[in-house]
Image: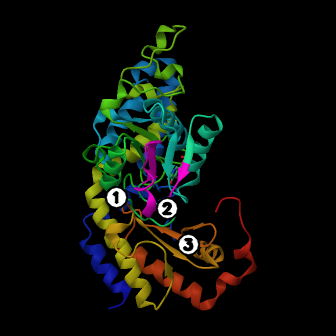
Amino acid sequence: MTPDTRAREFDAADPLGHFRARFRLPEGVIYLDGNSLGALPKATPGTLARVVESEWGDGLIRSWNDANWFDMAARVGAKIAPLIGARPNEVIACDSTSVNLFKLIAAALAMRPGRKAVLSEPGNFPTDLYMIAGLEAQGLAQRRLAPREQLAAALDGDVALLMLTHAHYKTGALHDMAALTRAAHDAGALVLWDLSHSTGALPVDLDAVGADFAVGCGYKYLCGGPGAPAFAFVAEQHQAELQQPLTGWFGHAAPFAFSDDYAGAAGIERLQCGTPPVLGLAALEVGVDLIAEIGVDRLYAKSQALSEFFLESLMAHDVALDLVSPPRAADRGSQLSFRHPQAYAICQALIARGVIGDFRAPDVLRLGFAPAYLSFADMAAAARHIAEVLASGEWQREEFNQRAAVT
Ligand SMILES: *Cc1c(COP(=O)(O)O)cnc(C)c1O
């Protein structure tokens, strides 16, 4: 049976197949980049139009109360909470992932006086490493990097915080959250998980593993739109003592008391800094509602089935690419990455055929399998395009070898 025939059978039996119609996907595009920018839910433009026309246009400033803009960050956070195994009062949607990292790294350092090291791994997502470096330049932190096999051994009495990305952005390799959280706690350190490549694609249980802090992205699998607000998680038992350094008025216990002195809100609201981005939150809420409706466990099952079928389809076309993701589906996130010296040009040639993946320097072709809207037919067709691009050598064309600013 050819991959295309098998794909038809899988699609016919797919319980999530009908959710594809809830997203707007351009004709002729196979979108394998939902792990960088999730697709547009069809409900988003209408929701945004209503928020703009009615809540902003007609309601004007009254909408802070009448349309519940004031509580929006906490409300959207509470909807993200069950997707990551958190309680509703432990998550807030605010700022960017980078800014949330800054606030939570600083807060963790303040909770471990006498310890300055923030332990992470080389090759973690750049912004995660840069945010540690920024606090280091302020004299507040010491950045310590250890390869994954040596992380546990690097947890000594100087480490205030272990900070890792659950699903690696480049390879998709997963960390054992439970084991590493336990090891960090045994060494007296706190733990911050970056869930940017997990949330909305894989089940995560922050409360069960005893995580202290977490952050994640709104515009990847949550489909919140470009530059969507991110989220931050603080375990309930840390909220009362949490001191985050961006003490803006929206994190105040009573912003509209206009006091001269800062007093942080009692709960997760303390993580807010300035006025929340209402339009961004409105778009994010649509994506979160849709992902929650589909359900993380079903999304995860489909994500594994998609990536396994994609590998089978490549094999059926005799494509031998160097897989840098873990070969076992259980060990990786919702993506497959391949190393090739010409990965950039191959990626461009695929985009010209409507197969949109991405390139990660220096030599990785990264394909994301957003399970909410991809079909098995997409997998079979993408594998066929890759086989044709490699066999024809069309990636060698001049136009596919010009680097753009965003890869
Ligand atoms: C995408 C991603 C980010 C993005 O951070 P922004 O502040 O939203 O630009 C951070 N960390 C990881 C691991 C990511 O994958």
Nearer the camera: disc 2 or disc 3: 2
Of labels 2 and 1, the one closer to you: 2
Q: Which is in the foreground here, disc 1 or disc 3? A: 1
In the picture as drawn, the residue positioned furthest to the front comes out as 157
The location of residue 363, given as percent across then percent down, is: 61, 73
Among numbered discs 2 and 1, the one appearing first in the sequence? 2
Q: Sort mark 3 into few (<14), some (14-19) or many (20+) by Cα contacts within 10 Å.
A: many
Range of residues picked out in magenta: 144-165
Residue 223 in sight from this viewpoint:
no
Report, in whole angstroms, how far the alpha carbon at label 2 lies from the one at label 1: 14 Å
Can you identify the residue that label 1 sits on?
Answer: 176
- Establish if 342 lies above or below 68: below
Callout 1 touching callout 3 (CB < 8 Å): no
- Write the residue at 42% across / 16% down: 253
Which quadrant: the C terminus? bottom right
In this image, 391 relative to 377: left or right? right
Disc 1 is placed on an element classified as loop
Position above or below: 165 against 312: above
Dot 3: element: strand
Q: Residue at x 31, y 72 (%)?
A: 305
- Chain-order first, disc 2 or disc 3: 2
Residue 355: where, in percent of width, then height? Answer: 53, 72
Q: Position of residue 149 (x, y in %)?
A: 43, 64
From the image, which quarter does the N terminus lie in?
A: bottom left
Q: For the residue carrying disc 2, how many other residues have a C-alpha within 10 Å: few (<14), some (14-19), or many (20+)?
A: few
Residue at the disc numbered 3:
365
**C-alpha gap between disc 2 and disc 3:** 23 Å
Which amino acid, by three-letter code, is at mark 3?
Answer: Leu
* Residue 147, label in figure: 2
Labels in figure, total: 3
The answer to whether residue 336 shows anywhere in this view is yes
Q: Alpha carbon of mark 1 to alpha carbon of mark 3: how far?
A: 25 Å
